[in-house]
Image: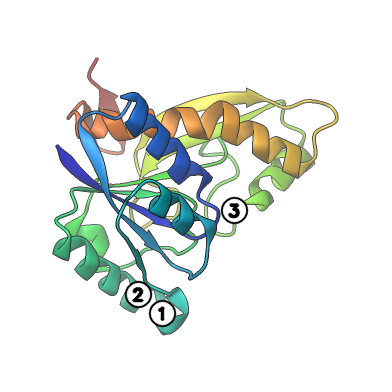
Amino acid sequence: MLNIAVFVSGGGTNLQALIDAQKSGIIKNGKIGLVVSSKEGVFALERAKNANIPYVVCPRKDFSDNESYSNELLKILEENNIGVVVLAGFMTVLKGEILKKYKNKIINVHPALIPSFCGDGFYGLKVHEKALEYGVKITGATVHFVNDVTDGGAIILQKSVEIENDDTPEILQKRVMEQAEWKILPLAVELFCAGKIEISGNKTIIKR
């Protein structure tokens, strides 16, 4: 069984989806062994406590740049024998050695259908604001591996969500989370833990 670390920065709604999926048996070949937060006092830590999951606070503000911060995160992962990392609303771009040591072992969820509305500067509500501004009729979420290009790693799963006429960024964000993110992130994690993802170049092949 793989040991999973979940990186968080805020409320932890995607963390909760993973916790719930573990309890319900959707995630059965891995176990959340650690939650790592980039900020103190966030509600995601309460979710970890409530689920009796060990957690570490490693504040981003204590480090001069993303690479030195990423190096500290790598130490934490190695000390805790982590097999896969899930970024669940984690607001720091990982850099350097951690991307080599955990190549194709770091999973992120992005609130759009990559390659639309992704890359540097596209996070949180900004993604949904841009989708509405552009006038697309369908958006969604993407679960992908993390590499040295922001939102550029191989795609694991995607799920579409229809945009409605009276949507605001906040309403759309909630629907994308409920209908897409909370569903495909746990599925992708289980696929990885079960050894059902093959990577060919920048594409994945899901073994059924």
Q: Residues within 10 Å of mark 3 (few under 14, many from 20)?
A: some
Residue 176 left/right relative to 76? right
Image height check: is 114 above or below 24?
A: below
Image height check: is 121 above or below 163?
A: below
Label 1, label 2: how far apart the Cα atoms are? 6 Å
The residue beneath circle 2 is 69
Q: Earlier in the sequence, mark 3 or mark 2?
A: 2
Amino acid under label 1? Asp
Horizontal and vertical percent for residue 107? 34, 45
> Mark 3 or mark 2, which is nearer to you?
2
Q: Quadrant of the C terminus?
A: top left
| Of 26 and 136, the residue lying toward us | 26
Residue found 80% across the figure and 34% down from its top: 167
Q: Secondary structure at mark 3?
A: loop
Residue 14 left/right relative to 26? right
What colouring method underlies this structural image?
Answer: rainbow
| Of 170 and 33, the residue lying toward us | 33
Horizontal and vertical percent for residue 67? 34, 74
Residue found 71% across the figure and 46% down from its top: 130
Residue found 14% across the figure and 56% down from its top: 81
Q: Quadrant of the N terminus?
A: top left
Residue 71 left/right relative to 89? left
Disc assigned to residue 122:
3
Q: Secondary structure at mark 2?
A: helix
Q: Residues within 10 Å of mark 2 (few under 14, many from 20)?
A: many
Label 1, label 3: how far apart the Cα atoms are? 20 Å
Horizontal and vertical percent for residue 139? 63, 31
The residue beneath circle 1 is 65
